[in-house]
Amino acid sequence: MTQLITTELVELDQNLGSSPEDVIRHLASKVAATGRASEVEGLFADAFAREQKTATGIPGGIAIPHCRSAAVTVPTLAMARLNPKVDFGAKDGPADLIFFIAAPDGADQEHLKLLSKLARSLIKKDFTAALRAASSREEIVELVDGALADKPAAHAAAAAPSASAADAAPAAAAAGAAPAAGSAGPRRLVAVTACPTGIAHTYMAADSLVAAAEEMGVDLQVETQGSSGAKPLDPAVIAAAEAVIFAVDVDVRGKERFAGKPVINAPVKRGIDEPAKMVQEALAAANDPHARRVPHFGAEEQADREASEKGEHIGQKLKRALLTGVSYMIPFVAGGGLLMAFGFLLGGYDVTEVANKVVLENNFGNLPEGGLGVYLGAVLFKIGNLSMSFLVPALAGYIAYAIADRPGIAPGFVAGAVASYMSAGFLGGIVGGLLAGYMAHLIGTWQVPRWLRGLMPVVIIPLLASIFASGLMFLVLGGPIAGITSGLNSWLTGMSGASAVVLGIILGLMMCFDLGGPVNKVAYAFAVAGLSAGSATNQAPWQIMATVMAAGMVPPLAMALATVLDKKLFTLNERENGKAAWLLGASFISEGAIPFAASDPLRVIPASMVGGALTGALCMATGVTSQAPHGGIFVFFAIGNLVMFVVAILAGTVISALAVIALKRWAAAKPAATVESVPVTV
């Protein structure tokens, strides 16, 4: 089997830069220089993207940046002992021992097991002490090989107990680590650890939890769901456990096996940083009849939602509620808007004036003036119009649902209907949904007699929350919000000339700022809320819709074009994503650019915003309109001034693509000087 580490892959007491980005780039260069990776940038991008998701620093001055990458040809370990140290996000400060684990996408199980085994060795004090005492690269390689072969470190220092273990004993007593009354032997827990890559954190968290549990006299069995394979816990072990710990960054496979057990759920890195605290919390949960438990099969979604809510600050809760409301609203808008567009296509612009009369008074045997086209156009327009009328109620209803679950839906829809009735628009829907959701949530926390509990979610909560939220909308808030909405719409839709171009720039920037996030959704919601108000004599709402849709198409199309123009700047995975981004962008799915923005936000997002602003300005300046709220180029029949719609999108796409290429070439962090002299084997 190919050796994982060689002396060429070791750096001792070197200054590799001041940031994790510098260090990772340098080590990626060393891996490529030894012929173990096909390119530096692809490996660096994959490793740094993993680092940005979760910092890889762990207690003890250690960091383990790692990734799977298509650029890696041979499973590899590079090591650096830094001077000065670099902060990799560990709670106890910067790291001086850096192990860079690079695995191919298709690494075999034996190599993955060795890489995982090495990661587990790094939480052993004698091993890390020996690494710090080593005086040569050869000695480092010998120590690593010894760890993989289970040989004791030659320079092992007397290992001091870890901070977490040292604190464990007194805390264990407080948490009730002694055997429960009436039971024999130690208390029993089970755990599952898992991380996205499944190489390092998965196994280190497992070992840290086991070591902390041993110090506390607790029997803890761990199932590691990692890349090198997973051996499921024995059902009898799970049945005997008092509680379960999930230290995971991904979904737990086979979660239903733990149904009914008290559970502590946290990111995998906490299992490394605070293992004793997690064990203490699990023991306390086992003694708490009100502790959160693993749901029975079929209820995971609700439990995951509750877990994600725990610890959220108010801003995060509001953001999640708003995005939930918008996501449930979009199908009403997309379907309804397209039907309205088809209605205009068949019945002409005047269909808005005759639709109500035609659908009620005419049929296939009694066609209206204008014939079959007008009749079908009126029917399609009316169906779409009715669908669009759910925009505000659906927005409010599902905002309330995100806050209070099912009991919040009815009061949320009612508050949204009131907001719509009072012409308070989507701003009123947001306010009504928040009021309904928080009131429903509050009422749901009331302690009521057992005989009343069954009525709470179906009668009491909807009744009282509806009275509160809708009453406030009618009596206090609806009028002022309607005034604000009316003024805002009049101001925006009344823009022309230079001010219209400014509006286009603003909408373009908003659509590209967070690629489907709350800012993007606010711009989109504003556009679709006014869509039904458009007409042959008032095309401003249609112009705003066209501007929003065109600008939202730019980021994924630009990233797709950039991967074609300069492939070397993108990883193999990004180039594959670029192929899919062509279709996503053409369909007005801004989220097609998210994989690129996630790995390189400081370059991708500004570049996207530049192109989006240009597209928005061109659309507003040339009077492009859209009667459809979604569909991109595939709803060409609903686009007015189609040529300029396409030209605006192409211009923004080209500008954004060139901008992101320029930023990746010339705004990249400078690697250490020694990196520049390292030849790269391709």
Image (cartoon, rainbow, N blue to C red):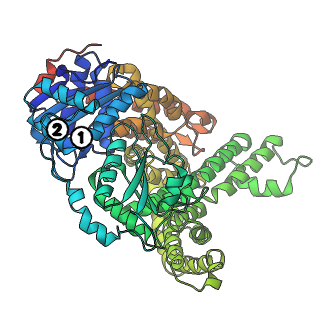
Q: Left or right: where does residue 294 sit relative to residue 74?
A: right
Q: Which residue is mark 1?
A: 122
From this viewpoint, is residue 619 visible? Answer: yes
Residue tagged 2: 97
Image coords of residue 650 (percent x, y):
45, 28
Farthest residue to the right: give it: 365
User: What residue type is disc 1 on?
Assistant: Leu
Left or right of 217 on screen, residue 160: left
Q: Residues within 10 Å of mark 2 (few under 14, many from 20)?
A: many
Q: Are marks 2 and 1 in contact (CB under 8 Å)?
A: yes
Residue 602 visible within the image: no
- Which residue type carries mark 2? Leu
Disc 2 versus disc 1: nearer the observer: 1
- Callout 1 crowding tier (Cα within 10 Å): few <14, some 14–19, many ≥20: many
Q: Quadrant of the C terminus?
A: top left
- Residue 488, given in percent of the width and then of the height, sits at 44, 61
Check the picture and name the quadrant holding the N terminus.
top left
Secondary element at tag 2? strand
